[in-house]
Image (spheres, grey):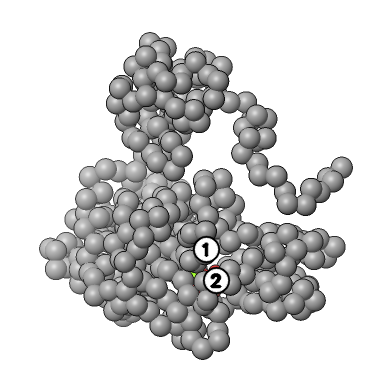
């Protein structure tokens, strides 16, 4: 395949490794400076210029977009998407994961464990917010921090309040997060490629530092991941729309808590710690995917009148329970079940003999009119899913 690596650091360890992994496999690979692209929008078809000249044809692009150029970088990636060039990480995935608030919001509806997090603006709401996540010591984070910069542990509520007010007065948005004490300055970085974890390491903070980032002096060691950690890492990356991702998780008493999903994970630390060929795994994955171009299902479906995708939930007292998919009558109503979600398991293309259980969720394709009566109404769903607040708050 012909692959473009988008990077402003051609000599960095990660870029070099990816480039040579591609070359070793006989691919044609170029490292292109993200900031040298031009996006021309006047022509008949989406196109890209590079260093002032029309870009040649590529099969795939591997974006390594740094934090400082998110806007421009994602615009370039989006243009490649318009041109049907395969990218493992989409522009939407990159921007969603980069903003810690946006990422947390997206993950929060998918049963992914995360440290209790809150976001407030008004001074009057700060102290109640800190108390809601468990009080001091409490973690304060800038929305777009990286390498541990912009992550602060405030020992007392008063100090936390002062830090938050100071940051907000300089127009910085901050997250307030429960401090996961039992993780003791350690965390797990899982490198996800496609639908599996190809390498994982534990990072341990230096001395009495609580941030385990390698840039903050943290040390790394290879770790055999518990299946639960593996599952959560893959799910988190998938939900964010990233096929190449570094998922950071804290080891809490209750299991893995996802802190962030990185769209351009560094390879040096993890390859050193695990002695695994992570770069090779990434290149092989892209090579395999090039044959399956990304299709925006919603966009394609919106043109086929009357048909669409909907999620049907099997109610506890409903007629579907105990029946097989074949007996459910869905097929006769022109409804195809694409996936069956049961708890945290996902069964793609479920067989007709699958027996339905209460709370199963069926992702279906069919006539919207036919499915309308079966989709749960918003209100019931909300009251069912929503956890009761610890301290009931009077909102009115
Ligand atoms: N809620 C928390 N509880 C305990 N430690 C945390 C918490 N949040 C972050 N940390 C520590 O701080 C480090 C940096 O936080 P993270 O959110 O990943 O920011 P960055 O994007 O700067 O890496 C983490 O790797 C972890 O060691
Ligand atoms: Mg991090």
Front in this rendered view, residue 324 or 95: 324
Q: Percent x, y for residue 189? A: 41, 68
Picture quadrant where residue 9 is located: bottom left
Q: What residue would you read off at disc 1? A: 253
Q: Percent x, y for residue 232? A: 43, 54
Mark 2 Cα within 10 Å, few/some/many (few <14, many 20+)?
few
Residue at 25% x, 55% y: name it: 285
Whichever of callouts 1 and 2 sits on the residue coming sooner in the sequence is: 2
Tell me the quadrant of the picture where the N terminus can be found: bottom left
Alpha-carbon span between mark 1 and mark 2 = 7 Å
**Residue lying farthest bottom?**
207
Mark 1 Cα within 10 Å, few/some/many (few <14, many 20+)?
few
Front in this rendered view, residue 52 or 356: 356
Q: Percent x, y for residue 328? A: 41, 16
Tell me the quadrant of the picture where the C terminus can be found: top right
At mark 1, the secondary structure is loop
Picture quadrant where residue 275 is located: bottom left
At mark 2, the secondary structure is helix
Residue at 63% x, 59% y: name it: 116
Q: What residue would you read off at disc 2? A: 182
**Residue lying farthest top?**
332
**184 sits left or right of 273 in the view:** right
Picture quadrant where residue 134 is located: bottom right
**379 sits left or right of 77 in the view:** right
Q: Percent x, y for residue 84? A: 33, 46
**Mark drawn on residue 307:** none
Tag 1–tag 2 contact (CB < 8 Å): yes
Against 315, residue 129 (above or below) is below
**289 sits left or right of 179 in the view:** left
Q: Is residue 104 visible?
A: yes
Residue at 42% x, 20% y: name it: 322
Q: Is residue 258 visible?
A: no
């Amino acid at each position: 395949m012909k692959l473009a690596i988008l990077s402003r650091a051609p000599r960095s360890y990660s870029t070099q490794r990816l480039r040579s992994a591609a070359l070793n496999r006989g691919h044609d690979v170029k490292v292109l400076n993200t900031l040298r692209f031009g996006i021309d929008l006047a022509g008949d078809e989406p196109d890209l210029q590079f260093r002032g000249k029309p870009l040649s044809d590529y099969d795939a692009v591997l974006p390594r977009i740094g934090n400082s150029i998110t806007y421009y970088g994602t615009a370039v990636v989006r243009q490649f998407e318009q041109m049907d060039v395969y990218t493992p990480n989409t522009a939407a995935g990159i921007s969603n994961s980069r903003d810690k608030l946006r990422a947390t919001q997206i993950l929060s509806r998918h049963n992914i464990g995360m440290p209790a997090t809150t976001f407030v603006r008004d001074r009057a709401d700060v102290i109640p917010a800190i108390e809601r996540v468990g009080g001091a010591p409490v973690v304060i984070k800038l929305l777009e921090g990286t390498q541990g910069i912009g992550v602060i542990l405030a020992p007392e509520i008063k100090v936390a309040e002062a830090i938050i007010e100071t940051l907000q007065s300089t127009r910085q948005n901050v997250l307030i997060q429960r401090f996961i004490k039992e993780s003791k300055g350690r965390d797990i970085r899982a490198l996800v490629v496609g639908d599996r974890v190809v390498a994982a390491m534990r990072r341990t903070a230096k001395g009495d530092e609580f941030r385990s980032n390698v840039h903050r002096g943290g040390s790394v060691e290879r770790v055999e991941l518990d299946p639960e950690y593996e599952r959560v890492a893959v799910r988190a990356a998938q939900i964010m729309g990233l096929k190449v991702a570094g998922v950071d998780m804290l080891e809490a008493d209750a299991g893995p808590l996802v802190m962030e999903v990185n769209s351009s994970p560094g390879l040096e630390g993890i390859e050193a710690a695990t002695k695994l060929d992570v770069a090779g795994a990434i290149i092989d994955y892209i090579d395999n995917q090039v044959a399956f171009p990304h299709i925006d299902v919603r966009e394609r479906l919106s043109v086929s009148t009357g048909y669409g995708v909907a999620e049907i939930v099997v109610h506890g007292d409903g007629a579907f329970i105990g029946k097989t998919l074949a007996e459910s009558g869905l097929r006769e109503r022109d409804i195809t079940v694409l996936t069956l979600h049961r708890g945290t398991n996902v069964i793609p293309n479920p067989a007709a003999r699958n027996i339905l259980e209460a709370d199963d969720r069926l992702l279906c394709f069919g006539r919207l009119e036919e499915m309308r009566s079966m989709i749960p109404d918003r209100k019931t769903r909300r009251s069912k899913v929503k956890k009761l607040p610890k301290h009931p708050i009077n909102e009115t």
